[in-house]
Image: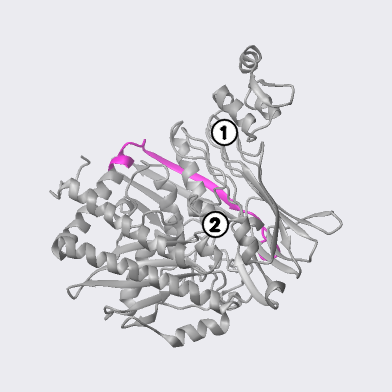
Amino acid sequence: MPKDFPDTGFDPVELAIMGNRLDAIVREMTSTVILTANSSVIGMARDFSCSILSSNHDIIGVAEALPVHAFGSNLQGQAMENFHPGFKEGDAFLNNDPYNGNTHAADHTILVPVFFEGEHLFTSVVKCHQADCGNSVPTTYFAAATDVYNEGALVFPMVQIQKDFTDNEDIIRMCKARIRVPDQWYGDLQSALAAARTGERSLKKFAEKFGAERVKAFVKAWLDYSERRAAAAIAKLPPATLERRGKLDELGEFLPDGVEIFVKITIDPAEQRAIVDLRDNLDCVNAGVNLCQATATGMAITGIVNCLEHDLPLNSGTFRRIEVLLRENCVVGIPKFPHSASTSTTLLADVICNTAQSSISELGDGYGLSESNMFLGVSTGVISGKDERVGDEDYVNQLFLMGGGGPASATADGIDTFTVIAGAGLCYRDSVEISEQRLPLIVKSMKLVPGTAGAGRQRGGVATRTEFGPRGNEMVVMQVTNGVSTGPRGVQKGHDAYPGANIKVHADGTEEVLPGYLHTVLQPGETIVGFDSGGGGYGDPASRDPQAVLYDVAEGYETVERARDIYRVAVLLDAEGFASGIDEAETARLRS
């Protein structure tokens, strides 16, 4: 057992049962949102997260929540107490303020304090990425926003949305008056409230079964156990101070040089602690790419946790062993009002996490991960316009049609259709059929692209390509992308992945390469192509198992040419041009 962590005496079997029950409750909440949400970005793409906080606002249950959403929910619990110290049973609060613990204005968070026998024991939290949040332009990722006023989103700094289980109609009228498709938003609000109340009911039953005093003892033991696990995992790492830089691409006239990020990590196995220092970075910029405290902290933690034991409990106990140093008015720190954090859940958030986890690989072969896709291209863009099928009614929604490749580790290939690291591969890919039914959209093609992954002993996930366009009316497509100039980096001699690209295909077939910041109008007959990058490789490609290379060629992940030139494997083809085997003698010669 690590030093300075005495055994609490809590029965380990009961501890496991109670810990797993909390995650089961989070999954109940998650299922409620999936089954009741209106917008496809929430219900179909799963761009939402549920979590449970203790009475002290520690994170104690997240199940499969998105890290960028859930790992800062403790800050929102504290904000609830700060703004409403007398909160009561039946209350519910709406928070989407990036200055008060939230991520960005598009993430509407519902917090419900849970009482048992008159005592506040838990807080049930549901955060949903809205299809529209009232921005001045139809997107929830407004990277060009010069400040919060230019961004234009409706911001609710922990306002009371329910009292005595009854909706605050004033808040609802405000949203309906400013959000482009108000009924869609209202349906998503009711879905989030229902999920939070589902968590409340199940947590009350949890308390009834074990009793309030046992529950409080469990919470302490659960967090202490998690901290012991994290401390033991860090103690196994070599001592080191690691420094690595990452980059956000140049973005139009408002960020012509992009943003370079510096991450410093100190691994102290003697003290069983990891420290991520983000303070030596630029001040906030006059654009919407600034990170808030929740996302900067959460994604730095994620970059470290990704490189530790895979089954660590994801809660505040584990996070105690990972210290994140931020400073005020920093582009990756604590933003100073009125700087905008419109894209706070992506872009620099992805850069921070990828830079941190790839930095850990410098400890040696077997440590860390490569970089994942950082390219939220048009396949995950926000589309809007008027739907000719239903009387030219307004529509707006974010797509999740595809997503690039995941990072490779020392022992596993990256997964495909990963989207980005901030979501940890947990977002779902949209159904083409359902998307075309719900939106005036035609999806021409979706496919994986051979030969685009970062090669390595373990390869990254492959890139994806999507092409779509409007039906009868023009369609506005907005998105902001990274990874156009440089693809995700490989580690330990692993190769970089191909960078991404966005391409507009005009009606006559001519192609136009678009910039990283997109605000494009598609006319009927025009389409747009999103090419999302793959993930970086891990280890020398020439050491990859030749049978794995053969499999990749046969399945269309790799090409015969790259198999020979990069992996040093001679793949045999049959009469129809399909991979049929390996030329062992030629492969031995190539690898010698």
- Report the amino acid beneath label 2: Leu
| Secondary element at image label 1 | loop
> Which of 450/534 is in front?
450
Q: Residues within 10 Å of mark 2 (few under 14, many from 20)?
A: many
Q: In this picture, is 497 found above or below 421?
A: above
Residue stretch rendered in magenta on the structure: 232-257
Give the position of the C terminus as an image quadrant.
top right
Q: What colour scheme does the image use? A: one colour
Which residue, given by chain and number where applicable, does mark 1 sit on?
A: 494
Disc 1 crowd rating (10 Å Cα; few below 14, some 14-19, many 20+) is: many
**CA–CA distance between discs 2 and 1?**
23 Å
Residue 309 locus on image (x, y percent): 36, 41
The answer to whether the residue labelled 2 contacts the one labelled 1, judged by CB atoms less than 8 Å apart, is no
The residue indicated by pointer 2 is 348
In the image shown, does 87 or 32 lie closer to the viewer? 32
In terms of image quadrants, where is residue 176?
Answer: bottom right
Q: Earlier in the sequence, mark 2 or mark 1?
A: 2
Which residue is pictured at 33% across the width and 80% down the height? 165
- x and y, in percent, of residue 93 in the image: 38, 77
Residue at 41% x, 64% y: name it: 32
What amino acid type is highlighted by mark number 1? Gly
Query: What is the x, y in percent for residue 134?
Result: 57, 77
**Which label number is shown at residue 34?**
none
